[in-house]
Image (spheres, helix red, strand yellow):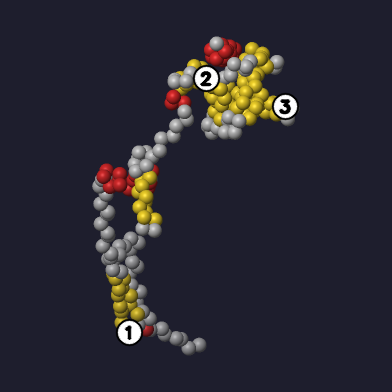
Amino acid sequence: MPTTTIDPTAFPKPTAPAPALFSTSTPFNFTVPGGSFSFQIPQKSPKPAPEPEEDNEEDNDKDQDQEDPEAQLDAETEVVFSTHGQMYELKPVETKTMEEEEDVLFESRAKMYRFGNGEWKERGTGTVKILKHKKNGKTRILMRREKTFKLCANHYIQPDMTLKPLPSHPDKSWIWQAVDFSDEEPVHETLAIRFTTTESAQQFKTIFDANKAKKEA
């Protein structure tokens, strides 16, 4: 059998293995038949770390004002706006409830009811007051619902009014009839009120009767 002789120079010579660890600046060399070549990965210079921003309280206040439009308007600020070339100025208006001209004779938390269609219906829970006008001396019962402040009762105390105990809660409740103005228009109502304590109920009746007696005199 003929013997084949292999010339070792016909094949590329392997280069030494690259080290396990290298940096981006390490060149890569390769030898191929007929020559060799090398290349190197360019190294990027690290970007400088951003400098911390200065805490400018004045700028922060401006940003907060821009985010919160209510902070830009004071409760008493006059607002001016224009429409179709005409300027309008809005000024705050003070809301009056007529209580500014009255003295509070009685005030307590209670629950108000009205009788209609053969049954008692709750009007709301809130603060009931007996108020006396500073000039004309007239007294009235005023009660508003909690949170909404809608009127539950609003009428004058008249000489012919009489408080009677509610059978279900005789020590804390009273029934009476009145021409009520809670809905602006006068309506003849049968009302009932229930207090949380016996003391409040008795005090309400005492002041109610005392001011009714003055009108009778």
The residue nearer to you, when weighing 38 against 44, is 44
For residue 194, above or below residue 146: above
The residue nearer to you, when weighing 9 against 32, is 32
The residue nearer to you, when weighing 50 against 22, is 50
Please tell me whether mark 2 sits on a helix, a strand or a loop.
strand
Which residue is denoted by mark 1 in the rendering? Answer: 34
Judge from the rendering whether residue 143 lies leftward or rightward of residue 94; answer left or right. right
Can you see residue 19?
A: yes
Callout 1–callout 3 Cβ contact below 8 Å: no
Front of the two marks 2 and 1: 2
Which residue is denoted by mark 2 in the rendering? Answer: 139
State the image coordinates of residue 95 (x, y, percent, origin top left). 44, 34
N-terminal of the pair, mark 2 or mark 1, is: 1
Amino acid on which the number 3 mark rests in the picture: Glu
Work out how far the residue at label 2 is from the one at label 3, CA to CA, in angstroms. Answer: 29 Å
Instruction: Assess disc 3: are there few (<14), some (14-19) or many (≥20) residues with their C-alpha within 10 Å of its C-alpha.
Output: few
Q: What residue is at 34 percent from the left and 43 percent from the top?
A: 78
State the image coordinates of residue 170 (x, y, percent, origin top left). 66, 13
Please tell me whether mark 3 sits on a helix, a strand or a loop.
strand
Amino acid on which the number 1 mark rests in the picture: Gly
